[in-house]
Amino acid sequence: MKMLVTGATGNLGTKIIDTLLKTVPASQLAVSVRNPEKAERLRVRGVEVRHGDFDHPETLVSAFAGIDRLLIISADGDNETRIRQHTDAVAAAEGAGVKFIAYTSLGNASESKLFLAPPHKATEEAILKTGIPYSFIRNNWYLENEISSIQGVIAGAPWVTSAGSGKVGWAPQQDYAEAAAAVLSGTSHENTVYELSGKLMTQEEFASALGAVLGKEVPVHQVDDAKYSDIMKGAGVPEFIIPFLVDIQKGVRDGGLEIESEDFEKLLGRPATPINEVLSQIINQISQTNN
């Protein structure tokens, strides 16, 4: 049984491989990466490192050769680029005779109106068309995505949002990584969809949890999208990122991440890590970095 993880040098991929290596022999693991030199730490641990570039599909066919179980980690980029890259990867998997495809998708991808949803919907559809057994691992939202805002609060800024009363199922990337590892290395995951979500919380509830860990009140400023954009610009956020952040706020406001699920328990035997524990870890990491 040979398993392969794409994008294994990214933040999520690194955590997934490290999790897998706790229970799976390194000889059964392979990774597909754009730059093999960046995966040297995996090679020395006995993991097979293969060159696979999503922008060069011909490299993926050879990268996936002889692989039984494949985990495609969604790539970065604009929607059009991601759709092309992902569908090419699925085609390469089919051509290589892969027997199982797991894919890190987005919450409620097939129905979602979030601006991030189209690549995930297209990828899921491409996988379904192959007829290869699959598992869609639909991740809600990484708590680590909020680190810059948490740093702002530590520095004395309020929690600024235009997400209104929309709820988010925040969970740490490590939980999502462990869930993906469980699917790739486990059994009975053929033709499944897992909606992975932490406890649903509003922005106010999140800020309250953050304040409890910091030991201070965190004021929440609910603003409109235009004001949110201005505040982000004033905070020094690069202009090309601001429309992305505004669209996320709008998507949350419209309920795009309000997906209740107990699928973490199905895969991990426990719920997502409590928010206060993760916030404490993140704040400690920020403190150590600053010192």
Image (cartoon, rainbow, N blue to C red):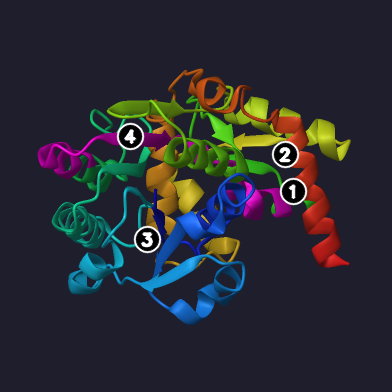
Instruction: Determine which of the numbered discs, if any, sits on residue 135 in the image.
Output: 4
Q: Residue 225: percent from the left, percent from the top? A: 43, 43
Mark 2 or mark 4, earlier in chain: 4
Mark 4 residue type: Ser
Choose the circle earlier in sequence order: 3 or 2. Answer: 3
191 displayed left or right of 243: left
Q: Which residue is mark 2?
A: 278
Q: CA distance from mark 3 to mark 4?
A: 20 Å
> Residue 187 falls in which quadrant of the image?
top left
Q: Is residue 22 rendered to the left or right of residue 188?
A: right
Q: Amino acid at mark 1?
A: Ile
Which residue: 31% across, 29% down?
190
Residue under label 1: 282
Point out the stretch of residues depicted in magenta.
124-151
Mark 3: amino acid:
Asp
Percent position of residue 53, x then y: 30, 72
Question: What is the spatial separation of the Cα atoms under label 2 and label 4, in whole angstroms?
Answer: 27 Å
Q: Is residue 135 magenta?
A: yes
Looking at the image, is mark 2 or mark 4 nearer the viewer? 4
Q: Return the residue at label 3.
A: 76
Mark 1–mark 2 contact, CB under 8 Å?
yes
Report helix, strand or loop for mark 2.
helix
Q: Which structural element holds mark 4?
A: strand
The label shown at residue 25 is none
Is 2 positioned to the left or the right of 227 in the image? left
Q: Residue furthest left?
A: 129
The reply to whether discs 1 and 3 touch (Cβ–Cβ < 8 Å) is no
Q: Dots 3 and 2: beta carbons under 8 Å?
A: no
The answer to which of 189 and 97 lies nearer the viewer is: 97
